[in-house]
Amino acid sequence: MPEACDDDNAVAGDGCTSCTVDPGYTCYFNRPSFCYDTAFVPVFTGNGDALVAALGTAAPGEVFVLKAGSYKPSGGASITIDQDVVMVPETAGAVTRLQGSADGGAILVVGLGTNVLFAGITFKAEADSDQAVDVDAATATFIGCEFQGRGSQGQGLRAHNDARVTVRESLVHSSAAGGIELDTPYFTLVNDMLYGNGTGGGGGSEFGGIWVNATPDAASVIAHVSISGCSGKDGQSGGIRCDGDMDITSSIVVYSAPMAASPACSFTESLIDGAPELASATNLHLLGSSPAIDQALSSVELIDFDGQARIGPRDIGADEL
């Protein structure tokens, strides 16, 4: 029987006990789970402007449970967070979207010194040159999220100024200026899918799927990512661009131009420029005939993109068949 939650059982009755959700609690994702007491956390039902106002007066550690729908501030404003908060949807799997048209800016700006957690949230830019998310000198964790930038400068996610970012089990797609730019040494990317990023404008984008635009810290990780159909401009990687030495493990990088990866990227137990047998150009799950199956022999990752368990020899990429 699959676990309903898992928080390492540090404290009984904290929302997840013996891998079972406690009565009156809701838990999101696994290993570790985030749980909250539904009696004390109201569901936020306002619009985008109300959300901006509420974030502006948030208490440290405040939890925002968003009702399904779109939250778009008026007047092209960004949603700026300068306090430690958690944001999750009321219903797991329901589309809960932060969107906007802050031309030349970002839809979500995570500011200096904050520590935030997002689970199951979609970030979608609408105006040209918009990033979906900008993390500036903050700590941010995104689990089960979706990112879509827009226009020639619109990246899915940019982290910079020594930001510390974790992106897990998330989807980054259709961002013309590239998927994820890591202008920071500190990052963890695991079980992510990226497609259709970096088509660019004019001379093309500086990268396609992922850009490691700093010398990575020894603890930084890129593992079990699947990248397909991403494009960089001439001489720049369409799949993964590394400006400092970076070893990527258990990953798939295919159908990306002008090349899958730049020379500073190295790969362990990965499938690069092969025929991975994926479901489609926009569905990077494995087919039963994929050569990626059971080939991540040294991986100890416990779950995949969909949260299902990885058992035995792991599959390369974000999906475990």
Image (cartoon, rainbow, N blue to C red):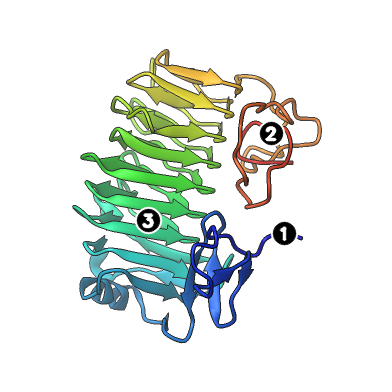
Residue at left 30%, top 32%? 185
Q: Which residue matches tag 3?
A: 126
Residue found at the very far right of the displayed protein: 289
The answer to whether residue 209 is visible is: no
Q: CA distance from mark 2 to mark 3?
A: 35 Å
Badge 2 element: loop
Which mark is nearer the camera, 2 or 3? 2
Q: CA distance from mark 1 to mark 2?
A: 19 Å
Can residue 15 be seen in the rendering of this structure?
yes
The residue indicated by pointer 1 is 2
Q: Which residue is mark 2?
A: 315
Q: In the image, residue 264 lies at what x, y percent?
A: 39, 15
Task: Tell me if label 1 and label 2 are in contact, CB under 8 Å.
Answer: no
Examine the image and state in which quarter residue 195 appears.
top right
Q: Secondary structure at mark 1?
A: loop
Residue 210, quarter of the rendered image: top left
Instruction: List the single residue furthest toward the top.
Output: 263
Pick the quarter of the image with the C terminus: top right
Q: Quadrant of the N terminus?
A: bottom right
Task: Name above or below for residue 104 compared with residue 242.
Answer: below
- In the image: residue 307, left or right of residue 168: right
Q: Position of residue 194 (x, y in %)?
A: 52, 39
- Mark 1 or 3, nearer chain start: 1
Q: Position of residue 245 (x, y in %)?
A: 37, 18
Q: Is 137 on the left or on the right of 255, as rendered?
A: left
Amino acid type, label 3: Glu
Please determine whether, in this image, residue 74 is positioned above or below residue 156. Answer: below
Of circles 1 and 3, the one toward us is 1
Is 67 on the left or on the right of 54, as rendered? right
Instruction: Assess whether mark 3 and mark 1 are in contact (beta carbons under 8 angstroms).
Output: no
Mark pair 1, 3: CA separation: 39 Å
The residue carrying pointer 3 sits among few (fewer than 14), some (14 to 19) or many (20 or more) residues within 10 Å by Cα, namely many
